[in-house]
Each structure stands twice: as structure tokens, then as C-alpha cells.
Image: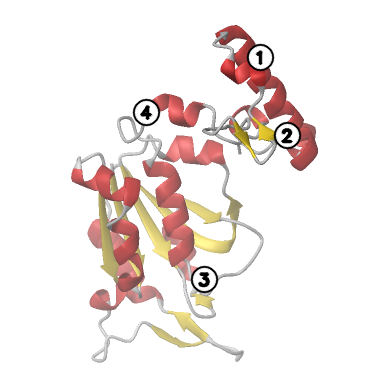
Amino acid sequence: MKVDILTIFPEMFEGFLTTSIIKRAIQNKFVDIKIHDIRKYSKNPHKKVDDYGFGGGRGMVLMPQPIFDAVEDLKKENTKVILMTPQGKTYKQKMAYDLSKEKHLILICGHYEGFDERIRTLADLELSIGDYVLTGGELASMVITDSIVRLIDGVIEKDSHLNDSFNNNLLDYPVYTKPVNFRGMKVPDVLLSGHHANIKKFREEEALKKTQKRRPDLLENGENNG
């Protein structure tokens, strides 16, 4: 998979690309992630990418020209263009699975007061990671990229994500490690029994209990997977 991220703050991605699973996925060539400075596509002598919005109002608005040129330069036949915006569709785990099967993604990070409305015509999909507003789309693009990359075959063991929270409309079951008894809190006996069928049943029941207690809405509407 190839991921191109368009931003006016490329330095924000330095740590993201050089640590943990993302770093290993890049090194092992499961994914190719490139960060593109939108300013490099600006035709303005001062590399300006924003201006005041028509009709007044506070804040600066990203201009269409640099972003259109960037997308047109990077886009291929099999590319899906995604616009990061709080007005987009709320991101869900099912979307992560679907996007992990794509060959090429372009993620556009908005910033300032917003972006020129005409930029929306470039997008195949508009996404939001929640009902709140960030200073820009950079953090959202990292969240989405991370959630997708970990699902690419070979990046992590498949069993590691099959039981993730939000699969099958359930939160993940509780897990434990050593010591068996920590400050009076003990690991459930069934997990020490070695009886795989009982362990499986216990985990399924606990996942359901946790979901009912913490996120009953997932069971009520069944829409968490998109």
C-alpha cells in the first residue's frame, strides 16, 4: 500500500513515521508513506497557501490551487482521496478494514479556519475521527493511517486484531499477565486452567459484559463497524 499525506506541517509526522509498528511496516515494505508539504505546490511567489474567506469571518482558509495541483500530481488510477474534516463521516473500525485493502490513499489535512469548499470535489471520502475540532487534520490523518496499516497482511499477526475492540460490535475481552495475584486482585482461575474451550467461552462472556457496561450503544444500534 502507498499512502500520501498532504499537509502544511510535515514536521509533525517525524515521530509518527519513525517509531513502533509504523516504522517496522515501512522498513519491511508493507507500506510506503510519504508526507508532502502543500506549500511546495503553491504558485504564489511567497508559497502562500491560505487567504481570508470571502464574505468576512475570522481565520484563514486554505486555497484550492496548491491542493488541486498536489492531488493531480500524486493521483493514480487506483487512488482513493480522503479529506480530513470534522464534517466528514465518523470513522469506524469497519472503514479501517475496507481502507486497508486499497492500493493507494491520499489524505488531505485541512487547517486554519477550513478549506475552500471546492476542494471537496477532489475527495472520494470525507472522514472525521470524532465530534470535536482539532487545529488541523494532521493528528486525524495519523490516527487513520495507524489504524489502517496495522491491518495490512503481515504487519502484525492476524490474531492480534481479530479480537480487537469494535469487531462484532463488542469491546475487547479483559486480559491479564504476571503476577497471578497483585495486591489482592487475582487472575481469573479459568485463564490458568489450560482448558481452551472454557477460556474461549469466558472471553466471549466477558467481552459482552464489558460492552453492556461501558458501551451499550454498540449493542443497541450495531453501527460501530460503519
Instruction: Give residue 126's position: percent from left, percent from top.
Output: 52, 55
Q: Quadrant of the N terminus?
A: top left
Residue pictured at 53% horizontal, 54% vertical? 127
Q: Amino acid at mark 2?
A: Lys
Q: Mark 3 — residue? A: 117
Tell me which numbered mark, 3 or 2, is placed earlier along the sequence.
3
Q: Quadrant of residue 203?
A: top right
Q: Mark 4 — residue? A: 157
Q: CA distance from mark 4 to mark 2?
A: 24 Å
Nearer to us of marks 1 and 4 is 1
Q: Quadrant of residue 43?
A: bottom left
In depth, the one of 112 and 196 nearer the eye is: 196
Q: Quadrant of residue 47?
A: bottom left
Instruction: Give residue 137's position: percent from left, percent from top.
Output: 47, 66
> Where 37 sits versus 197, above or below?
below
Nearer to us of marks 3 and 1 is 1
Q: Amino acid at mark 4?
A: Glu
Q: Are marks 4 and 3 in contact (CB under 8 Å)?
A: no
Q: CA distance from mark 3 to mark 1?
A: 51 Å
Tell me which numbered mark, 3 or 1, is placed earlier along the sequence.
3
Q: Quadrant of the C terminus?
A: top right
Tell me which numbered mark, 1 or 4, is placed earlier along the sequence.
4
Q: CA distance from mark 1 to mark 4?
A: 22 Å
Residue pictured at 31% horizontal, 71% vertical? 10
Instruction: Give residue 82's position: percent from left, percent from top.
Output: 44, 54
Instruction: Give residue 160's position: percent from left, percent from top.
Output: 45, 30
Q: Mark 2 — residue? A: 210
Q: Secondary structure at mark 4?
A: loop
Q: Amino acid at mark 3?
A: Glu
Q: Mark 1 — residue? A: 201
